[in-house]
Each structure stands twice: as structure tokens, then as C-alpha cells.
Amino acid sequence: MQPPTRFSGSLSALWNRGPIWTESNRPSARLIARPLREFLRIEASGSILLLIAAAVALLWANSPWASAYDDFWHLKLSVDAGSFHIEESLQHWVNDGLMVIFFFVVGLEIKHELVHGDLRDPKTASLPIVAAIGGMVLPALLYIAITGGTDASSGWGIPMATDIAFAVGVLGLLGRRIPSAARVFMLTLAIVDDIGAILVIAVFYTDDLSMQWLAIAGALLALIVLMRMMKIWAVPAYVVVGVALWFAVLESGVHATLAGVALGLLTPATALLNESVARDYAQQALRDRHLNADELHRLRFLLGESVPMVERLQNRLHPLSSYFVLPVFALANAGVQLGGLGEALSSAVALGIGAGLVIGKPVGIVLACFIAIRLGLGTLPRHTTWAQVVGLGFVAGIGFTVSLFIAGLSFGSDDLTDNAKIGILFASAIAAVAGTVLLATMSPQPPEHEEDEDDSDDPAGSTDQEQSQPS
């Protein structure tokens, strides 16, 4: 069958033997496949799955089958290959292994922002950077003020975090009510917040270091740089070295997920080839209106290398991170028993987290913005009011994923960890509701022409992508 040369009508019209399954009228397609596809297109869908997973974990941990929850996630799994041996509980495999994918995607996002995004332009990035710092410092200070001198004081890094998945989800639910410039401000703030959380984990939540394994990890990072310089672009080769790097970082005492961040930052953010190379080859190969197998393989390679590796990996891994890794992480970590809820919420650790996320985040962000603007370091995002900045500050107080992650590293006591998790869940919920209500109330639906003007000035949509050697 010769492929059609023009696309018109529905997708099913392209096929001689009837529509593909998802476009058919089969009940499974109409009732499952197409609704699922539309759900995954919603900007907030990842946050919804994350919330469902957390709710399931809470219900499971407080049900008659609570012991099964603990037994399942504390099940020991080991990997043996000759002298290589590693044994961890299923929960640790999720936190130390699966979450590497999440932090790798975070590293990719940071690299893209540094090369092509708003972090590249100091003038555009200055206000959200200052706001992010204020939104990290004040929550930590409030937490220390409440828990200082107690065993809970080591969790000061918990309320510093912003859950970028939930933040994006809230903005997605509000749609056009949020100006494009305010979205850019929030996303840049969240990415800078991620950088801060990564540094805090690396510096303050690291076990005793093994210099031998740390040296091996450094050598593997140098090997990756050398492979890039030699223009080795076979992804499987990097996967092998990346797995070895993960194990070396795990054994070194530095948290293993930081290997994912390092790999993300080393990923090329500029394309190997200029787009014109693929375009010229396609025109030449299609002169006879037919592609043979060799020409098709060559064209696929040229088209792929015309897109930066950072963007390709983000496109492939972001759904995996949002729809699988983070929900599984929530399922493994959000299951705390609520029997002593009143006592847990009145504990120093929960009060410190609540004060940090619900009060410290919005106040720190607004205060930092005010000081930065008065000093001439930046201006409010276009079409954005101070009330909306306050709402964005509350949205940044949704700590959830990264806060839960840091809570698992902070305490040697299960009671403190459980109290911290309860504080995170309740504080994040309060911050989410407050931010959503405030933004919905203070952000009227803009006229159509205003949004179009907004989009035309959106820095996120107008960045140039250098087509040179990978960087």
C-alpha cells in the first residue's frame, strides 16, 4: 500500500483497511482508549494521578490491611551479579532507584533553561531567582524557630521545596486566567527551587562519604564528558555508564538520585545537526517520490539529530516521570497512619512544616520580589498583579513530592518521619487550596486579544535554538 501524500479528514481516513484501534467505534476504544488519551493531554493530569496515588496510600495504610502496606513496601529485593550485590527494601528501590528518573528529568529541565530558557537571560531570570531564594530561606528559618533545640530540627530543608508537578497542575486548571508571563515566572521559580533542593540534599543530607566510590563516580562523569567530546551518540552506551554512575554514587554516601541530576546537566542542549541538513536530504531523497529502507533510516537519523538531545529525552521521559514514577513514589511514601492525627499535627515538626509551607513560602516570595523591584533588579511579570504574586507564592507552598523525599532523609525516628509526612500532606493541601482560590478570584478571564499579545511576548515561546556543536 502506497502511503497517502496528503492528510485530510479524520485519522481513520488514512487507512484502507479501516481505522486504527483508537479511532474505531469499538467499545474499548470509545470508553477507555480515547478518554484516557484525552485525560493525558490535560496539563494537570500528572498532578491528578499523584493525588490519587497519595489518597490510595493513605486509605491503604489506615485500612484493615495496613500491615500488608508495610510488609509490601519493606519487602527486600536483591540483585546479585558475581561480586556485585545490592539489597534494599522495595521502598528504597523506589526512592533510591526509580526516583533517579525524576531527578534526571529535573536535570534536563535545568539544562534546557540554562541554555535556551529564561535562566539564560539574567534580566528575565533575576526576579524569579530572587523570589525562589526568599521562598527557600524564610520557610527554613520559620521551621528552625519552631523546632530549634529538638530532634526535629534536622528537617529544616523540608519546607524549602516546591512540587513543580503540582504547581504546573494548578496553573493548568486555571487556564487562561493566569497571564503567560506569570506562568514563566512560576516555572522559573520552581526550577530554581529544584536547584536549591538538589544542593541541600547533596550538602546537608548526605551520609558518611566514601572517597573511593566518590572518585569512581567522578571518573565515570569524566568518561561521559570524554564520550561527548568523541561524539559518541549511542544512547545505550550512556545508559550503561549511567547505571554504573548511579551505583557508584549510591555506594559513596551521596544520595543516589543526584546521579540523575548530574546526567541531566551533562546532556547536550544543542542539536548535533542544523535543520537544513535533514531538509536538504529529504528534498533530494524524495525527488523520485519514493523512499527506500536506507533512505528512510538515514532521514530518521538526520531528523532526530536536528533536535537537541535534552528536548528528545524530556519528550520521552516526562510522561514516564509524571504518570508512573511520581505516583509510585507517592504510593510508597504517603501511607502514614492517621490514628494519632491530632497529636501529629500539634507536633513541632508538623507545625514547623506548616508554618514554612503555608506562611514562609508566600511571604518569603512576595517580600523578596518587593525588595528586588525596589532595588531595580526586576519588574513584575507582564499583566501580573501583586495579588496574583501572593497566589503564586501559595502555589509554591505545595511541597509534596520533594518535601516527602527530604523528610525520608531527615530523621532517624519513624515517629518524626510520620509526623513530617502528615504535616507535609496537610500543609500542601492548605497551600494548594489557598493559592487556587486566590488566583481564581484575583485573575479574571482576559480578553482574547490580551492573551494573544501575552503569548507573543512569552519568552518561553520565542527562544532561539542554536544549531551548532552540542554543549
Image: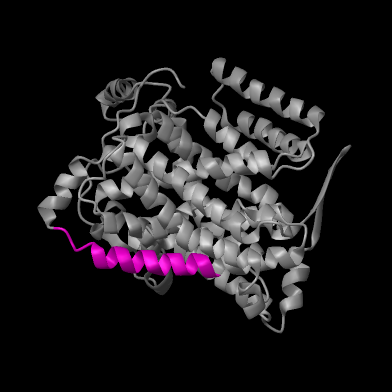
Q: Pinpoint residue 39: horizontal percent, then vertical percent.
A: 39, 64
Q: Is residue 298 above or below residue 85?
A: above
With 459 as the anchor, is 36 left or right in this view? right
Residue 418 image offset from top left, x and y in percent = 68, 67
Residue 421 pos. (x, y %): 63, 65
Q: Is residue 335 magenta?
A: no
Q: Position of residue 136 (x, y in %)?
A: 50, 48
Q: Quadrant of the N terminus?
A: top left
Colouring scheme applied when the structure was drawn: one colour
Range of magenta residues: 426-446
Residue occupying the point 35% across, 23% down: 466
Check the image and report above or below for 331 versus 454. below
- Whether 349 is drawn above or below 86: the answer is below
Identity of the residue drawn at 29% across and 49% down: 182
Question: Which image quadrant for residue 437?
Answer: bottom left
Marker count (numbered): 0
Q: Residue furthest bottom?
A: 64
| Above or below, comparing residue 135 to residue 236 in the picture | below
**Residue depicted at 54% across the width and 25% down the height:** 233
Residue sitting at x 48%, y 27%: 268
Q: Is residue 341 visible?
A: yes
Q: Residue furthest top?
A: 230
Q: Main secondary structure of the magenta part?
A: helix
Q: Can the viewer see residue 17?
A: no
In the image, is residue 442 part of the stretch drawn in magenta? yes
Taking depth in this image into account, of 19 and 418 the one nearest to the observer is 418
